[in-house]
Each structure stands twice: as structure tokens, then as C-alpha cells.
Image (spheres, helix red, strand yellow):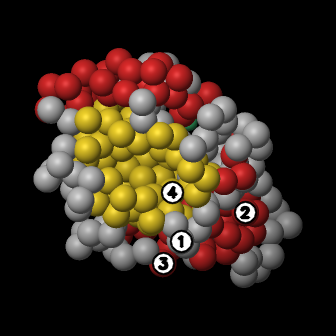
Amino acid sequence: MIVEQIWTGNAYRNFNYLIVCPQTGEALAVDPLDYEKCLARAKDNGWQITQILNTHEHGDHTGGNGPMIKATGAKLLAHKNAKDAIEGIDVGLGAGDIVKVGRTVELLALDTPGHTMSHVCMLSQTETPALICGDTLFNAGAGNCHGGGHPNELYDTFASQLDKLPDNTLIYPGHDYITNNLQYTLDREPDNEAAAKLLDELTASHDPESAMVTSLAQEKQINTFFRLTSATVIERLREAFPDLAESPSQREVFVKLRELRNSW
Ligand SMILES: [Zn+2]
Ligand SMILES: [Zn+2]
């Protein structure tokens, strides 16, 4: 399996992806907003885009569908409950569905509500799993919930699905927000040495054209939304929310971290 990350360079800092079967050259385009860049990258490599996957219904993920379908005749896949929000879905996906790309690639659909209520993440069935996570999980961050989502459901998605994936799962998010998100992690947990070290490195070298790909194990060190039992996180949270319980639940910490992030 080839995962080709395409930096759009737009103001929203979107990443698009091509998931490619190396044997047949068939490709699935993920959220191909910058359809011209995606088409050019496919052409340069001799790949044929036969499917489009939208992780969710927001315009910065679906905006390239029309011209991409016109150029390739690709079939459109998205969450089955997004049919009223996304025009022209050919295949509606639910939890556990498998999407095949060419002969060698299989992607497992995860139903991951929270950022919106009809959001899918795709998990490659490979020795080193790759997670295409749209706006659910970002490098060092989590999606917001003010475009049709709910922080409680986002917490459930993190706790019951993402948290349980293998440590070596590679993370391919829908946006490049890593440096900003690391700053938020450090705002919440100033003694997080892994986050501080990575931010230092990226301040010198970050280039979204060849972005670093984190693993889930690394996210659990640098992403405040996975650090719900950190004593520093809880202590700092109490400064903003003096009524916070002595030992708050992980859900409560997550939802409050999400709330603070909205105005940070
Ligand atoms: Zn979104
Ligand atoms: Zn987005």
C-alpha cells in the first residue's frame, strides 16, 4: 500500500491523500479538495483514481468531488448517514465495512462521531496500520465540535476506538495543525518534555510538503487529548475550572480540554 500525502497549501491547511495499490496502480482519493494536485500526482505516478472517500461532510473535504468525478468517473464513498449532506454518494459506509483498492489494499471503516456525527476514519489492514482520520484526530490535537459535532461523542470515539488501536498505527490527519497543537499541549502541560522537544525540532524544520508522520504511541505522549490522567493537565485545568472534582473522570477532562481549546 502506498499512502501519498498531498499538501494543498490552502488557508485551511488541508492534507489530501491518495491510497494506492502498488500492483495495479488503482487509487482512492481521500477528501480531494485540491483535485488538480491530486490528479497531477496520480498522472505523474501512473495511478488511476477509481474511488473518492470523504471522511465527513465539511466543504473543505467534499469541495473537490464534482470535478474529480468528472475527470475520473470515480465512485464516491462516505458515511451512510451523510447522504443528505454530501451529494452523489455511491457507497454509504458503516462500521466494519471493508473498502478494497486494487488487489492489495483493504481499508476498514470506523464510525467515528464527534467532529461531525457522520464521520468515518479508515484503518488499513496492513502490518503497520495506517489511520486516515480526517478531522477526528490531528497530530497533537483533536477536531473541534462546532460544525455539527459533540465533545461527548468525540471523547467516546477517542476512548473506545482510537485509544485501542495498535501503538504503531500511523496517523494521517485531514489538516496540518501540528505546531499550533503542540503549543496547546504545552499550554496545558508545560512539563511535557516530548511535546517541547518535538516543537523545537519542528520550529526549525517543519515542512508540510513532507510532513512528519506520527504514530499512535507518539500521539499518546504529545497530544493533550490522550493525556487525560496527567497530574499537570488536571492541576492546570483546575485553575480554569475551580469546581473540578478531586479525581475528575477522563471524560470530564477531555470535554473541558476541548472547551478551552475553542477559545485558546
Ligand atoms: Zn471538518
Ligand atoms: Zn477539515
Name the image quarter holding residue 47. Answer: top left
Q: Which residue is mark 1?
A: 96
Kindly identify the residue that appears in the image at 36 percent across and 44 percent down: 28
- Whether label 2 lies within 8 Å of ligand 1 gets the answer no
Three-letter code, disc 1: Gly
Kindly identify the residue that appears in the image at 72 percent across and 52 percent down: 81
Looking at the picture, how far across and down is residue 62, in whole percent?
Answer: 56, 31
User: The residue tagged with tag 1: helix, strand or loop?
Assistant: loop
Q: Which residue is mark 3?
A: 164
User: The residue tagged with tag 4: helix, strand or loop?
Assistant: strand
Query: Can you say whether 262 is above or below 62 in the image?
Result: below
Kindly identify the residue that appears in the image at 51 percent across and 28 percent down: 65
Three-letter code, disc 3: Lys
Which is more N-terminal, label 4 or label 1?
1
Q: Are the residues tagged 2 and 1 within 8 Å (C-beta)? A: no
User: The residue tagged with tag 3: helix, strand or loop?
Assistant: helix
Relative placement, left or right, of 20 versus 248 is left
Separation of disc 2 and disc 3 at Cα?
Answer: 16 Å
Separation of disc 3 and disc 4 at Cα?
Answer: 14 Å
Report the disc number at residue 121.
4
Which is more N-terminal, label 2 or label 4?
4
Q: Is residue 150 visible?
A: yes
Query: Can you say whether 231 is above or below 72 in the image?
Result: below
Which is more N-terminal, label 1 or label 2?
1
User: The residue tagged with tag 2: helix, strand or loop?
Assistant: helix
Q: Which quarter of the rendered image does ligand 2 occupy? A: top right
Q: Is residue 9 visible?
A: no
Kindly identify the residue that appears in the image at 66 percent across and 32 percent down: 87
